[in-house]
Amino acid sequence: MLQRSAVNIRLAKYAISTCDAYMCDLAIFHCQWGLERLLIFILEKFGGMSEDPRLSHTHDMAMLIGWVDARTNFTIPTELKEMADDLTEWRISARYGKDHVGSLSTAIDLIRFYEDLRNEIALKQE
């Protein structure tokens, strides 16, 4: 799960590098997916939810963030918490062709949140 989340973030960074407004949609989609996978990894590894079937059946970012907040001592940025519902909607919208044009700043913020959580994982695994 951790390696797959890293692939999503690499794809997001590539999409950002193209400087194409529509690629920001793709970048945000991959950021959402990468963060989703990272949150699931945190819950499995540090939150005691490795056997919980709900993890494989949800894409609800607010729910995942809430579980990480309640079950671990990881720091979830307030800005990410505030974006959770939009990120869940973005995943659905991006898949079914609704016209969004994501902002570069949103994609960059999401990558930063991801990298901060990855760094926190690295510290806790030492």
Image: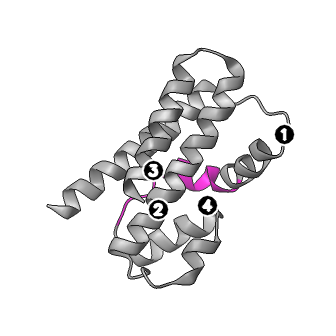
Residue in view at x 86 percent, y 39 percent: 98
Looking at marks 4 and 1 on the same chain, the residue that comes earlier in the sequence is marked by 4
Residue contact between numbered discs 4 and 1, judged by CB atoms under 8 Å: no
Looking at marks 2 and 4 on the same chain, the residue that comes earlier in the sequence is marked by 2
Rendering coords of residue 83 (x, y %): 63, 49
Residue for badge 4: 61
Residue for badge 1: 97
Residue for badge 3: 5
Residue contact between numbered discs 2 and 1, judged by CB atoms under 8 Å: no
Residue in view at x 55 percent, y 67 percent: 64
Given the image, on which type of amino acid does mark 4 rest?
Answer: Met
What is the distance, in whole Å, between disc 3 and disc 1 at their CAs? 23 Å
Say above or below: 73 vs 84.
below
Q: Nearer the viewer, mark 2 or mark 1?
A: 1
The residue segment tinted magenta is 74-85
Given the image, on which type of amino acid does mark 3 rest?
Answer: Ser
